[in-house]
Image (cartoon, rainbow, N blue to C red):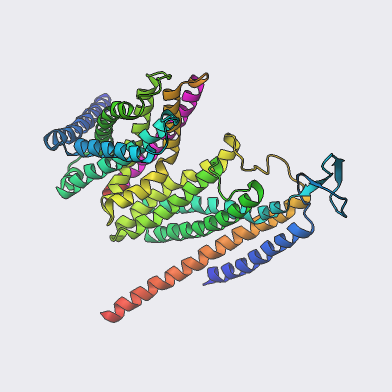
Amino acid sequence: MRQLKIAVVMLLIGGLLTTAAFFLAFYTAEVQRFGTVTLSEEIDSAYPLVGVSNEGLQYERPWFSQKIFYFHVPVAEASFLVLILSAFFGVRFLTTRRKEYDTKSRIAMETALTFVALTMITGVLWTKASWGVWWDWEPRLTTYFIMMLLMVAYFVLRNSIEDEERRAVYAAAFAVIAAIDAPISFFITRLIPSQHPVVFKSGFATSNLLPFILAQVGMLMIGYAIYVMRMSEERMRERLEVAKEALED
Amino acid sequence: MARGAENRQGSRGASRGLSWRQYKAILRKDIVMELRTKEMVTSMGIYALLTMVVYQVALSQAGTAFDPRQIAAGLLWLAFIFTSMLGLNRSLVHEKDQGCLEALLLSPVDRPVIFFAKATGNLIFLGIVEILTVPVFSFLFLQQGSYEGQWWMIPVVLTAGSMGIAGVGTLLATMSVNTKGKDFVLAVLMVPLMYPLLLAAVSATTVAVLGGADAGSQFWQAMALIGVYDAIMLVACFGLYEFVIGA
């Protein structure tokens, strides 16, 4: 019960932090520039005039779609971490055979899948704004998509087994294999040429770092809160099942 | 003291010899059963042939300017992944339906030995189907263009790729055979897990078919990826098999 209270507090703080990060991202963070835009006449712009060509005046183009970075990246990092956590609980289950670790692994996988869905939605929006297409089969997107399919497969596997013990063992084993894709997807943009930006390699302004850190910490808190709340719901349901069985007898 | 050590060493040597014998026995059982029923290789072979027919339909409107060699590797591996799923499912369904898996578990055989023996059996059957499919495929689709690659690359990439398919597939088929939707679950689990291997295998096979200036370096780059995948996945499957088969 105490854990649940902490979770509620975490959820509130996490919500506040991510909201603060959202405002900071628009008010204090520096707007990144993204190439130039050519206009036929002079305008009153906060963005500097870089040159005059035959077609018109060239202004630096503000890169507003970059703002989704403060939401997209924290959610994506959280999804990797929670997936690894799920695999960790899977290993704990296989070594101890205690049912609670199976439940923990399943709930962690659910939480991770929620984050994956959010990452996919924000990512697709950004891709359309920045690359002009909704989807591109480039290494990061592909490995991430595969990761999502593996997590969906985890639940397909669970749902098609009736025996409880067997379901727990198979799910734990599959969670471990599926989690191998998380580091691959994370490091692939650093290893092979990919269109997906690697922000922390290309440098970062301090005014952008603050909202990012706030959003990241807030998102991890929200993730923790979702996980704990789902766990307590699950425990209550188990108690209810036990009570029901006792009543029937 | 010395005798004790000797004894221990002797017994360890004997157990190693024993597990090698167990490995051979399980493998021989699979091969003998296949020779009697000829079920797996026939069904996989016919399935591969049917896939070729479907490919013909898919390519029927492509026109004469289209060079099938560009996508030959992809088509080949597509056929292999689907036929292998069919075969893997069969190989474990037999074990389960006839109670053989339970007998194997009751006998004093190390679990890893079962894994390696089953995986080797599946590798052999998949290999036979591949050996049959590759000439048929090139006969049906690759007659116009000349062959510009280096032929020795094809068996190398086929062997490395099939090792990954057979290893991971044996673990996943052992799981899926105990589920409600056997072959569907196998496909859902297998295709995403196989993705990195398939991508690298298709890239290596394309180089082997098309050749090119830096064919060697491209080929070995893809082969390195396959090697890393095989190593990581086989170790993971080997470690997890004991838990999975006991459940």
Q: Quadrant of residue B133?
A: top left
Q: Nearer the viewer, residue B194 or B170?
A: B194
Q: Position of A54 compared to B97: left or right?
A: right
Q: Nearer the viewer, residue B113 or A72?
A: A72
Q: Residue at x 42, y 50 (%)?
A: A175
Which is more toward the observer, B152 or B120? B152
Residue drawn at (52%, 18%) of the image: B213
Query: Is residue B81 something one can see in this rendering?
Result: no
Taken as a whole, is the magenta stretch helix, strand or loop? helix
Q: Quadrant of the C terminus of chain A?
A: bottom left
What percent of the width, then of the height, locates residue A35?
75, 43
Coordinates of residue B127 in the picture (x, y in percent): 28, 30
**Residue B200 point in image, percent of width and height:** 45, 33
Q: In the figure, A243 relative to A194: above or below?
A: below
In magenta stretch: residue B239: yes
Rendered residue at 65%/51% (across/down): A129
Please say if A37 is above or below B9.
below
Q: Where is residue A183 in the image (x, y as percent from the top left)?
A: 52, 43
Range covered by the magenta-colored residues? B216-243
